[in-house]
Each structure stands twice: as C-alpha cells, then as structure tokens.
Amino acid sequence: MTFLILRIMKIKKSDFFDRVYTLVAKIPKGKVTTYGALAEACGIKMAARTVGWAMNSAKNSNLPCHRVVNRNGALTGRMHFGSPELMEELLRFEGVEFDNNGNVDMKKHFWEPNKNKIKSKNKRKK
DNA sequence: CGGCTGACAACTT
DNA sequence: AAAGTTGCCAGCC
C-alpha cells in the first residue's frame, strides 16, 4: 500500500539515493539512525537494503555513514570502513555509548530522520 | 538486456 | 521463539 502511494508521487529512482545522502548528512554528531528509518524517511520502508547500498556508494564521500547502523544497533557496515574498529572508534569519539554486545545504545542515541523536510517538495500529494 | 548481489527489515511458518 | 521468505533500488557481470 504505502509503497504504491510513493510510486504515484513520481519519485525518481536516483532521487532515492539523494534523499538518503541528504538525511545521512543531517544526522547530528553523537547520534545514530537505522537503515530502516532512513528508508522510511525516504518514503520506502522496505528499501532498507537499498539504503545500505547507497551507503556503499557513498562510503568514499564525506557522509557520516558510521552513524548509520542496523535496527539492532549493530555496526554491520564496519568492515567497509577500511578497519573494522574504525566505525566504533568514530562513534565512541562522538559520545555514542555501546552495550555489552558492542551494539549502539539505540535508546539513547537513536535519531529519527525528518522526512517532512524532504517531502516538502511533493507536498501532501498522494 | 536479464539476472544476481548487497552495509536491512518486516512478514510468515 | 527461531529460521526462512519476500521486497526494495542501483550497480555490475
């Protein structure tokens, strides 16, 4: 249902990546968000996987992709930072806390992307 | 041009 | 509750 509405909103394919990049760039220091949250903010909740792919393409950029973790708070993409420890180090340096499992404390540091900003262009068009 | 893959997540059995 | 299946978009073979 939801995804159908999105298609009607005539979202350009490449637009999805742009949205992801925009949102990631807005993640405050010391905060983290999830692939699913970003996907949802971009309008397609099920495309969480694509968000990860977007990150992979953006890993060479200046985007704070280390602030994006999976729903469990696990740093699933750490191996893509050159060093598996780099991602955690960056987050710790920014003040993000980890639990005993090495996962981010989502309750304290989860940041919800503001999708309204991005959708402003499309207004309330269904 | 068709099919497979990938830093995920939700649904189903 | 745990494991398997499906859906998404873009890039690559």
Image (cartoon, coloured by chain):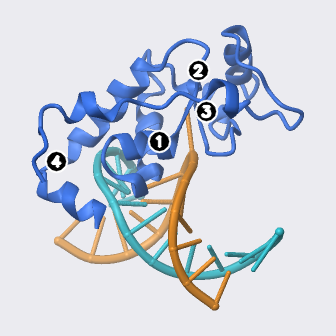
Chain colours: A blue, B orange, C cyan
Q: For mark 3, does the 10 Å Cα neighbourhood hold few (<14), some (14 to 19), or many (20 or more) residues?
A: some
What's the CA distance linking mark 4 and mark 2? 28 Å
Give the SS element for disc 2: loop
What's the CA distance linking mark 1 and mark 4? 18 Å
What's the CA distance linking mark 3 and mark 2? 20 Å
Residue position marked by numbered label 4 in the rendering: A11
What's the CA distance linking mark 1 and mark 3? 21 Å
Say which residue appears at 62% left-offset and 45% top-offset.
A71
Do we see residue A52 in this rendering?
A: no
Q: Which of marks 4 and 3 is nearer the N terminus?
A: 4
Q: Residues at marks 3 and 2, common chain?
A: yes
Residue position marked by numbered label 3 in the rendering: A80
Give the SS element for disc 1: helix
Q: Earlier in the sequence, mark 3 or mark 2?
A: 2
Q: Which of marks 4 and 2 is nearer the N terminus?
A: 4
Task: Give me the chain letter of mark 4.
Answer: A
Q: Which of marks 1 and 4 is nearer the N terminus?
A: 4
Residue position marked by numbered label 2 in the rendering: A31
**Do the residues bearing badges 1 and 4 touch, measured as CB atoms within 8 Å?**
no
The residue mark sitting in front, 3 or 2, is 2
Give the SS element for disc 4: loop
Give the quadrant of residue A124: top left
Label annotation for residue A37: 1
Say which residue appears at 25% left-offset and 27% top-offset.
A117
Which amino acid is tagged 1? Ala
Say which residue appears at 47% left-offset and 41% top-offset.
A37
Q: Is residue C6 left or right of residue A93?
A: left
Task: Give me the chain letter of mark 2.
Answer: A
| Residue A51 at x, y percent in the picture | 43, 43
